[in-house]
């Protein structure tokens, strides 16, 4: 039997939820592409939907802080398709 502390168990649960959410998004993305919706439109609507929900949950100031963090990650190349992890 695996003995996990509460925080470790919560981290595993969150990681599993993120993986399932990622799979849902990939499936919806593939469905949109197969229906003839351009990737740019899918991406923009996904970002808009996400920002709307995050602002509803956390407020504009917190989301602006998160967006600035995302900006830095973009500048460091974290989201580039050709990125190599060392």
Image (tube, rainbow, N blue to C red):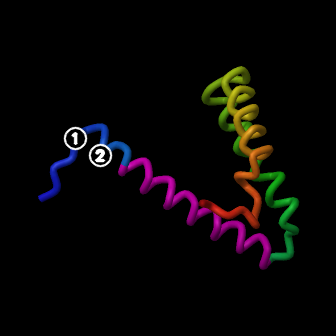
The reply to whether discs 2 and 1 touch (Cβ–Cβ < 8 Å) is yes
Quadrant containing the N terminus is bottom left
Q: Quadrant of residue 53?
A: top right
> Which residue lies at the image location 67% right of the left edge and 64% below the top edge?
84
Q: How many marks?
A: 2
* Most distant residue in the top direction: 61
Q: Which residue is mark 2?
A: 9
Residue at image location 62% in from the left, 61% down from the top:
85
**In the image: residue 9, left or right of residue 45:** left
17 versus 50 height, above or below: below
Which residues make up the magenta segment?
12-34
Quarter of the image containing the C terminus? bottom right
Label 2 – label 1 distance at C-alpha? 6 Å
Q: Secondary structure at mark 1?
A: loop
Residue 47: horizontal and vertical position, in percent? 76, 47
> Circle 1 sits on which residue?
5
Q: Residue furthest front?
A: 86
- Measured as percent of width and height from the top left, residue 67 is found at 74, 34
Residue 58 in the image: state x and y as whole percent: 62, 26
Which quarter of the picture shows residue 43?
bottom right
Question: In this image, 53 relative to 4: left or right?
Answer: right
Check disc 2: other Cα within 10 Å, few if <14, some if 14-19, many if 20+.
few
Whether residue 75 is in magenta: the answer is no
Per the image, label 2 sits on a secondary structure element best described as: helix
Return the x and y of residue 68 as percentages of the image width and height.
75, 32
């Amino acid at each position: 039997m695996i003995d996990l502390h509460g925080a470790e168990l919560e981290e595993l649960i969150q990681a599993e939820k993120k993986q399932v959410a990622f799979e849902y998004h990939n499936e919806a993305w593939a469905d949109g592409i197969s229906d003839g919706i351009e990737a740019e439109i899918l991406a923009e609507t996904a970002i808009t939907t996400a920002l709307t929900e995050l602002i509803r949950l956390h407020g504009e100031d917190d989301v602006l802080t998160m967006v600035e963090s995302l900006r830095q990650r973009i500048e460091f190349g974290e989201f580039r398709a050709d990125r190599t992890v060392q």
